[in-house]
Image (tube, helix red, strand yellow):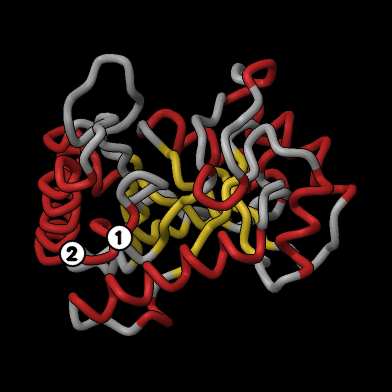
Amino acid sequence: MINIEANLNRVKNEIAQAAQVSGRKVTDIELIAVTKTHPTEIVREAVDVGQLVFGESKVQEARAKIPLLPSNIRWHLIGHLQKNKIRHALPLFEMIHSVDSLELAQAIDRIAHEDGLHPRILLEVNVAGEGSKFGFKTTTLRAELESLLLLPRLSIEGLMCIPPLAEEAETSRNYFVELRELRDALEQEFQVKLPHLSMGMTNDYSVAVEEGATLVRVGTAIFGERKRRNANL
């Protein structure tokens, strides 16, 4: 039997310890509990012990789940957003972490204008240059950031990354440093504030916090392993 409250407390304590190590305030870091493939009953358990910020990877799963849960929950989209799902996604999520191309950003901006919305977004960076992953290349992001910043409906609030899966958390540290340094350089070069860094998952969130994460996306450490039958959701 999974003890959601104990798992949440353990994750929050480890975040606090990592923040202390790096001289940061724990209040500057937000835990996003990732509920991908987990049923609403599990989410309610987390809500009952005070967790109100959750992440979903698939718009269709979120559309089915969110109406069944308390309205005070705050939802973040952390998975790839297909253009044909934008109109469904915008009313559901307070932030989209995974804007991975100028073309997608332009489509979000257009639909947001049509629907009278002002989405908060993060720009996903493919820090390792993996062919299997979405995200801006560093050089592409630098070349296109001015065009992104001109999109009037979008509030670009920072960067996101998903490093290569590794057994050791320390393996991810260089990628987190790279994302933070890229953010700092873009802020200086384009005279813009990008306050958020979404980085760190179950295997490496403590290292991510040490390197400047403001948003950590943790699922398995809280809710346990995802069901195999739902692996493609």
For label 2, the residue is 187
The earlier-in-sequence mark between 2 and 1 is 2
Instruction: Tell me the residue at 23%/39% (across/down).
Output: 144
Q: Identity of the amino acid at label 2?
A: Glu
Mark 2 surroundings: few (<14), some (14-19) or many (≥20) residues within 10 A: some
Quarter of the rendering containing residue 74: bottom right
In the rendered structure, the answer to whether residue 128 lies left or right of residue 19 reads left
For label 1, the residue is 206
Is disc 2 placed on a helix, strand or loop?
helix
Reply above or below: 229 against 178. Answer: above
Instruction: Tell me the residue at 56%/24% (across/down).
Output: 82
Residue 149 visible in the picture: no
Instruction: Tell me the residue at 81%/45% (across/down).
Output: 40
- Front position in the image: 185 or 62: 62
Where residue 78 appears, as percent x and y from the top left, is: 51, 42
In the rendered structure, the answer to whether residue 191 lies left or right of residue 119 reads left
Q: Are marks 2 and 1 in contact (CB under 8 Å)?
A: no
Quarter of the rendering containing residue 125: top left
Residue 67 visible in the picture: yes
Instruction: State how far apart marks 2 and 1 are (Cα).
Output: 25 Å
